[in-house]
Amino acid sequence: MAIKRREFLGRIAAGAAVLSVPGFLAGCSVQQATAVAAATPENPFLDWFGVDQATAARVMSELTANGADLADLYFQHSRSNSVSFEEGSVAEASSTIQQGVGLRVVISGQTGYAYTEDLTLPSMLVAARAAAAIAVGSKAVAPQSFAAKAMGELYDTSVPWADIGIDQKLPILERIESKAKSLEPAVRKVSVHWSDGDERVMIATLDGNLITDYRPMTRVTLIVTARKGDEVQSGYANIAAREEFGWYTEERLTTMVQEAVDRTMNLFDARRPPAGEMPVILAAGAGGILLHEAIGHGLEADFNRNGVSSYSDMMGKKVAEPVVTVVDQATIPHERGALNYDDEGNRTGRTAMIENGILTSYLHDQVSARQYGRTPTGSGRRESYKYAPMPRMSCTFMEAGPHTKDEIVAAVDRGIICETYTTGQVELGAGDFTFNVKNGWLIERGKVTSPIKDIVISGNGPQTLERITMVASDARLDAGGWTCGKNGQTVPVSQGIPTVLVSTMAVAADAARAASSATVA
């Protein structure tokens, strides 16, 4: 059944108001607790708003009236839900809907961009004229029809999140809380944060392609607080994926809970780290945050095009030891950073940015690819229809190396292992960084001797890359729900790394964190 836009928005508003009341959530039915009673159709832009190919062609024609080298219409409809669960009850819940279209035209290196939430033809034409006003170029011929591309299969789901009610989610949250408290009597408080969402995009391009993609997402974060005497410590774990409800198996939940509890309890026996320059081992998985932030951003083409990145003049040159290969690959099924198509409508794939220590490629969107004379790498991404795309990472990782973790530990006379991370600061492009590490381990004479906490590591990304001397065979992507920020836009990503040895890095203790978490009155 088609839903008129006014009726549709009315249902959204009513659903959002209902979901903001925790007491209602605890005792009501599935249909009453969802944001919109009707499930999202396969193409909401057509079924709900009447945006057919003829409409898209008319808007594209107006957008390119003054000329165009590139142009696209990016339609987006997303529905997201979140629940916070504490001390046996729902503390907060919300549901949001976002929809609109972004209109982009690129003429002689200049970008015109406009967006509207109103998906009626008059409103879209006004936005198209605003975007087209940036410059005048050679006349572009807009397509009168579009060739529909096949939808990808990287994250197929059998049941959309729109069909999963709060009554199905609550038993999982209760089990997580129960598991955490049963594993360790010192656990005093458990907080569980759940989110899920369905996103649908439709992209019409100047070259006559029409791309649709359905993008599910879910994440659960567990925060555990424990107490021994007057000392209180907190730890966390989280898991995320482009998956469906059945992904939350007993085994997966148990592993997450065990990690959170273990990380928390280790803090009671942990001491402050040594200070100074020393060897640092980045643990497999979560250590990918440093690879992503301090190194990966420097490999995005816009930073190199503007001369901001340290890699701007390093193409084809050695930037790391031969054991290092760094890849960005969006085609890993169900990963948080996975994408069938990027946000410009290009098929995604695998881009080896560094191969055996040699810089071989940047990450390109269509604009940078034209300027470099390269093919786009499927790396054009945007937070939503309100933003123009730019080169971004998706699933970024270092490939496995020839060593074992035990060999790497044995090679260190005195140093540390960095295991879980909290906050940090990075100068994007240049790669100067400071990261706060919550959990780690001290290495003495080639052996792991004791846990450490409240660690600060700092350095420069490209220099750190050069100092990686050993890479283990245990490469893996971290299971957590990472979100990347750049130029005011956030996008979901995945990242990972094998166990690697950095020959030297600056290490210090986080005095402020140690003081705030050590004792309570």
Image (tube, rainbow, N blue to C red):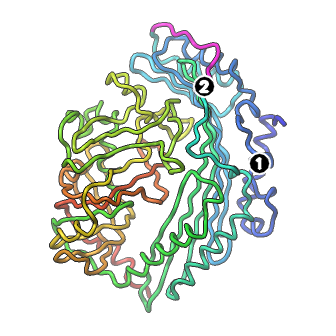
Indicate the secondary structure of the residue bearing disc 2.
strand
**Three-letter amino acid code of the residue under disc 2:** Leu
Q: Residue furthest right?
A: 1
Q: Residue 324 at what x, y percent from top left?
A: 25, 49
Q: Residue furthest front?
A: 402
Q: Residue 208 at what x, y percent from top left?
A: 57, 18
Residue displayed at 33% across by 40% down: 352
Residue displayed at 60% across by 73% down: 176
Displayed quadrant of residue 328:
top left
Mark 2 against mark 1, which lies toward the viewer? 2
Residue displayed at 76% across by 52% down: 15
Q: How many marks?
A: 2
- Residue 423 horizontal side relative to residue 26, left or right: left
Which residues are drawn in magenta?
138-147
Displayed quadrant of residue 434:
bottom left
In the drawing, what numbered circle is on residue 36? 1
**In front here: 348 or 323?**
323
In the drawing, what numbered circle is on residue 210? 2
What is the chief secondary structure element of the magenta stretch? loop
The image shows residue 426, relative to residue 61, as above or below, that is: below
The image shows residue 273, relative to residue 365, as above or below, that is: below
Q: Residue furthest top?
A: 139
